[in-house]
Amino acid sequence: MVIYWVIWFYLCLCNIFSSYKNGFGKVILIITFLFLFVFIGFRYQVGADWYNYLFFYELGKDTDLKLILLGSDPAYKILNYLGHVFGYQDTFFVNAICGFLVLFFLLKSALKLEKYWLVLLICFPYYLLVVSMNYNRQAVAISISLWAFCRLLESRFIQFTFLIILAALFHKTAIALLFFLPILISTKFQYSKFFNIFYIGISLILISIIIYYSSLQDTNIYLQGNENINSKGFFVRWIYHLIPLLLFYKYNDFFKKQNYYPIIRYFCILVLFMLPLGIIFSTLADRFNLYLIFFDLFVICTIFSNLSRTNKIFLLFTLIAFYTIQMYLWFFHGVWSVKAWIPYQNYISNYLSSWVF
């Protein structure tokens, strides 16, 4: 468990002492991402779904490439196919590539949002620590979607569409994110307020249906044997949106003046919609809620950039305290943290201890 807390306190210190105006900080950032790549991509027997992914890796050993391309989540299954072609006995190759993709698109998004240490502070306690070290497919889809939304806010519609389709090739639920595209288009063509309200209502229904049927087809242990589709930790994880929601409400007048306001408002509506959805279908809400981390990143980074020095310090230490409490609750009161994350193991360190030392 110590290594997780060491990384966390390192990220806290980077946020407290690093200057975004210093070019050397970006060098340290790259080194940090390389370390996280090794930490996440080369983990060994870490994650609640570790053996489940091994099972499906073995199951796909003799699968025809044509069937893979025509099936669901083909991009992820191609990685499994290549792993067998290269002769790997387990998911070593798949995890490494997924870890690289997660951190590559996260790095691009962090640099675009400028407050890159703040991005890591927000992402590490759950997205990197739990999702990226467990749900390989969706972790990649989420990271690609982060960069897709960065492009959408710049009205790069074609790039956004391509990136979301790419994300959906790793995890089918990402296709629901295409519902964001008409929101910005309708604003540019100045459609009526009634049309926007009608579209938002219809899109919430359709998103729920897409997530529901996608999850029913999912063979991941995440839903196996769980007829009630219940996720006990959903409400704890939804609380991660609490500070961004408060900031969005407090500085709503600031956001209203920006061209991207309809997109961020739609994010806010989806975040709030997940709460009642989670009461009925908590696992479905939990699955889609992961994609909404962009709302947290964008709102916090944007507001942080426009605060006075005193308010920046207050917000930063509030975030550090909030996420530290969340990590403490997960490690000491979570069901899976002790079972599947402790002790941390890594292919590289295991090799060095076995063959070198």
Image (cartoon, rainbow, N blue to C red):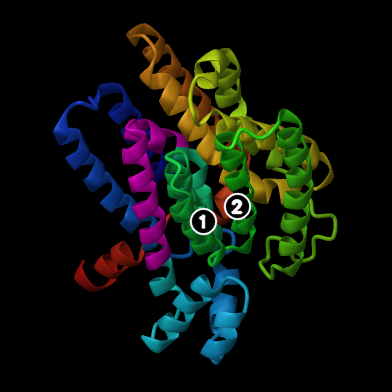
- Type of amino acid under label 2: Leu
Q: Residues within 10 Å of mark 1 (few under 14, many from 20)?
A: many
* Rendered-image quadrant of the C terminus: bottom left
Would you say residue 231 is visible in this rendering? no
The residue depicted at 36 percent of the width and 63 percent of the height is 42
* Tag 1–tag 2 contact (CB < 8 Å): yes
Q: Is residue 221 magenta?
A: no
Residue 236 against residue 19 in the figure, above or below? below
Picture coordinates of residue 166, whole percent (x, y) = 49, 63
The disc label shown at residue 161, or none: 1
Dot 2 falls on a residue whose secondary structure is helix
- Type of amino acid under label 1: Thr
Within the image, what quadrant is residue 51 found in?
Answer: bottom right
Q: Is residue 76 left or right of residue 280?
A: left
Q: Is residue 169 left or right of residue 352?
A: right
* Rendered-image quadrant of the N terminus: top left
Picture coordinates of residue 50, whole percent (x, y) = 54, 66
Q: Is residue 264 left or right of residue 3?
A: right
The residue depicted at 36 percent of the width and 9 percent of the height is 308
Picture coordinates of residue 236, whole percent (x, y) = 66, 35
- Relative depth, front residue between 16 and 307: 307
Within the image, what quadrant is residue 233 found in?
Answer: top right
Dot 1 falls on a residue whose secondary structure is helix
- Relative depth, front residue between 219 and 141: 141
Mark 1 vs mark 2, CA separation in Å: 7 Å
* Residue stretch rendered in magenta on the structure: 96-122
- Relative depth, front residue between 125 and 1: 125
Residue 47 against residue 338 in the figure, above or below? below
The residue depicted at 47 percent of the width and 26 percent of the height is 300
Task: Name the magenta segment's main secondary structure.
Answer: helix
The residue depicted at 42 percent of the width and 81 percent of the height is 83
